[in-house]
Amino acid sequence: MQLHFSPSMKSITISSSNGFIDLMKIKVAARHISYRTLFHTIIILAFLLPFVFILTAVVTLEGVNKCSSFDCLGRRLGPRFLGRADDSGRLVRDFYEILNQVNTVKIPNSLELPESFAQLVSEMKDEKYSAKDFAFILKGMMERFEREIRESKFAELMNKHFVASAIPKGIHCLSLRLTDEYSSNAHARKQLPSPELLPLLSVNSYHHFILSTDNILAASVVVSSTVQSSLNPEKIVFHVITDKKTYAGMHSWFALNPVSPAILEVKSVHQFDWLTRENVPVLEAVENHYGIRNYYHGNHVAGANLSETTPRMFASKLQARSPKYISLLNHLRIYLPELFPNLDKVVFLDDDVVIQRDMSPLWEIDLGGKVNGAVETCKGEDEWVMSKRFRNYFNFSHPLIAKNLNPDECAWAYGMNIFDLRAWRKTNIRDTYHTWLKENLKSNLTMWKLGTLPPALIAFRGHVHPIDPSWHMLGLGYQNKTSIESVKKAAVIHYNGQFETVAADRL
Ligand SMILES: *[C@@H]1O[C@H](CO)[C@@H](O)[C@H](O)[C@H]1NC(C)=O
Ligand SMILES: *[C@@H]1O[C@H](CO)[C@@H](O)[C@H](O)[C@H]1NC(C)=O
Ligand SMILES: *[C@@H]1O[C@H](CO)[C@@H](O)[C@H](O)[C@H]1NC(C)=O
Ligand SMILES: CC(=O)N[C@H]1CO[C@H](CO)[C@@H](O)[C@@H]1O
């Protein structure tokens, strides 16, 4: 007997070598095989396989060639299998009845499940089972399959998560080699930008982009796609902020691969005098907090109740737990007015975006006195990515949250924001951010779990100006079908789905 999966996974063929049941084709219906469909298919298969096998085996044993229905088989099988000689027409009905009884009964603890299908068959040959035993064994084996399938599905998601969040070896080596270059090659150390361009770093008629990342390749993609898509690249100033360990490599890369006519500087967090413990009291606490360490770096499967979670929810939880959500580089955007005291309006980009359009019109948008020009994420065609309201980010069972926030308020996205720093400096956004971060730590992270966006959603309340969704398309890299037309039209596409790394590698 053979089980054959078609390459597209759309059909499964069962065939037996003696030609008796020569073809049984199971079509898996839709084009997208949902986990549920797959699961049911496997359950049905688990039922069918033993039957098919028994049919085949019996037919072979009895040397019957033209017995092709349950009914005919019943006549042959009935007396032996059901333990009584009976009119054979009732066999199938009787057997269904037994299956039905067993369906609602718990499997007896004493029942020993065969380890393998082969063992089941050999025990059947020894006439070890009554029909009821057999039904129990079927049920037990299926439940075991079900458990194993779920477990391996979750394990697969874990592995995908690790693959997607680990630094690919090639990229890791790139950073090391560039760091080495920095110490050995004078060109890699040359000043960025060249001294005569330095004053332009704070001239407000230029278009200032800020990017905060420790991923050199990602930074390169963001910067070069911005410059290539621009109609006035000579007006672009990039401020790339990185951490101490990546600084030398990042500097080497952009010194050796200039982006002229655009202007670019590389800064490390340790070069900002303003970033001191007095000014940023919460961050260290955030990174060191026991619960956070455990939450982001702990065993992800141990805490999850697998029978309650769907693989999809589990995958998005895993994604949300990536340690990148607690790093200083990620929180940095809340300090833009202080880090760039001379700038009026800046665009802040995440490192997992690709720019496809000239961005200058962003500076023309009238933010109406608001601080943050952002794309709202509560309405849109993609119901998975664009259905985010406050209730998706916060725990409304927490009294402080319930008292202060509205669960229906529309969320907005980080990743591509235009910030009016002048308006920002007149607000207390940073203090609000700190206050809520501290409250959440005090409450043992029960108010929200998801990194830097939730406190920003609170801190920027009333300071957000919605911009046209085509400026920023989110969620590339989710399993759900992304509309290619929207991707083509979007100014910025954001690979913040689960398969982000995989997707970015294809660029
Ligand atoms: C997981 O959830 C199921 C269904 O709600 C429940 O019966 C079971 O006790 C839970 N298991 C754990 C370990 O919490
Ligand atoms: C916070 O969580 C930790 C670990 O789960 C626990 O030991 C501690 O008692 C909790 N603290 C509060 C105030 O709930
Ligand atoms: C939500 O808040 C309530 C009340 O503080 C708390 O009991 C519960 O554990 C929280 N839920 C989560 C998922 O943290
Ligand atoms: C193919 C697929 O995963 N489709 C899903 C897209 O998202 C919606 C909303 O969550 C689901 O209902 C679909 O099953």
Image (cartoon, helix red, strand yellow):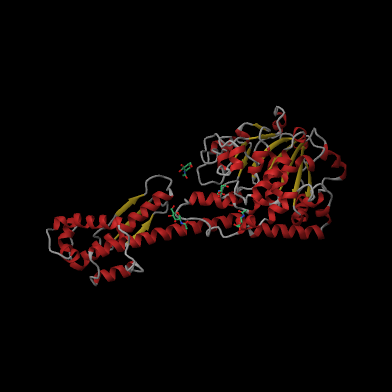
Q: Is residue 429 left or right of residue 66?
A: right
Q: Is residue 371 left or right of residue 393?
A: right
Residue farthest along the right direction in this orientation: 196
Q: Quadrant of residue 294?
A: bottom right
Q: Nearer the viewer, residue 398 or 62?
A: 398
Q: Quadrant of residue 494?
A: top right
Q: Position of residue 98 (x, y in %)?
A: 23, 58
Whether residue 54 is visible, yes or no, is yes
Whether residue 167 is visible, yes or no, is no
Q: Nearer the viewer, residue 161 or 248?
A: 161
Q: Position of residue 385 (x, y in %)?
A: 55, 41
Vertically, is 223 above or below 185?
above
Which residue is rendered at x = 81% and y = 50% of the image? 271
Q: Quadrant of ligand 2?
A: bottom right
Residue farthest along the bottom direction in this orientation: 126
Q: Position of residue 430 (x, y in %)?
A: 73, 41
Q: Position of residue 73 (x, y in %)?
A: 18, 60
Q: Quadrant of the N terminus?
A: bottom left
Q: How many marks?
A: 0
Q: Is residue 104 left or right of residue 279?
A: left
